[in-house]
Image (cartoon, rainbow, N blue to C red):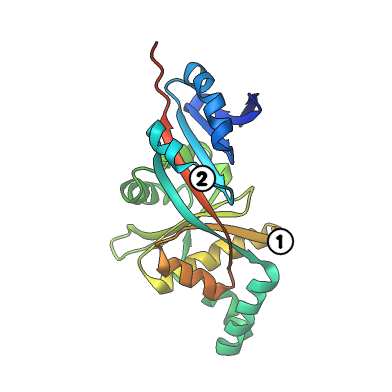
Amino acid sequence: MEHEIINGVEILTEPSQGYAQINDASEEELRSVWPKLLEKYTGYELFFCFRNVPVPSSLMEELGAKLLDDSLEMRLSVPDFEEFLKAVIADVGAGEAAKVSVVGVTPITEENFEAFATFHDKSNPDMYWTSRRILERIDLWQIFACFDETGGVSDYVMLMRPAAEIFCCYTKDATKAKALLAAAAQNAFVSGAEETLYMIDKDESLCINAATALGFRQCGFYQGYRVIVNYSK
């Protein structure tokens, strides 16, 4: 991403995508920079992201920004995940330990991406990372999915590889939630990460419980808002 500083506020941008992002700014900072944002980034999708800082909710409402994410921050370290694997070994034996947590989970590749794309776009129509954008930056992603009897995707998890961040786990099945999250965590750790981050909607008790069972610990919160910048003189 490109970045610049305006009135002391850092703005991250992807000009080719019409995307701009501001992280953890205060209400005072946002009010001071807003007129310049209107002039410079008209037509952009602007995302305000707040992680473990006060959220200026009244300003977001004033700007017409839509709340997209209201999440818990959960983290899983290698030692904590190893404790989960020890429990698996105790249940099924060492020979099956590596397989049991990811049974029924398939990596998304070029060959099966279309099935994922169809389900993802239908299930998450408001998400910035549409299937088209994911495909354009597929180097950033490792995706795992469960398929139904018709060959369509029924559940999936997305891991953003550079940050070892589990970005989205979409399922309504507790067993699949655990398997998908375990697959993502294993991939992150095999790739060299010492811990993985999972941002999960506060209302998603099924996935929160699955993550907790794997050893994830709640350690913060995150809120994300989106507004289309519209400037008119």
* SS at mark 2 in the image: loop
6 with respect to 128 (left or right): right
Count of marks, rendered view: 2
Give the image quarter of residue 150. bottom left
Residue at 59% x, 41% y is 24
Q: Is residue 80 above or below residue 119?
A: below
Return the mark for residue 219: none
201 vs 85, nearest the viewer = 201
- Could one spot residue 226 in this view of the protein? yes
The residue indicated by pointer 1 is 194
Contact check, label 2 and label 1, Cβ < 8 Å:
no
Image height of 20 relative to 89, above or below:
above
Q: How far separated are the C-alphas under marks 2 and 1? A: 29 Å
Question: Which amino acid is tagged 1?
Answer: Glu
**Residue in front for this viewpoint, 95 or 7:** 7
- Disc 2 target residue: 55
Q: Position of residue 4 (x, y in %)?
A: 64, 25
Q: Residues within 10 Å of mark 1 (few under 14, many from 20)?
A: few
Residue 232: give x, y in percent of width and height: 38, 14
Foreground disc of the pair 2, 1: 2
Relative to 46, 13 lies left or right: right
- The secondary structure type at the circle numbered 1 is loop
Looking at the rendering, in which quadrant would you find the C terminus? top left
Give the side of residue 78 with respect to residue 154, left or right. Answer: right
Q: Quadrant of residue 159?
A: bottom right
Left or right: 35 in relation to 52: left
Kind of residue at disc 2: Val
Q: Answer with mark 2 or mark 1, whichever residue precedes in sequence.
A: 2
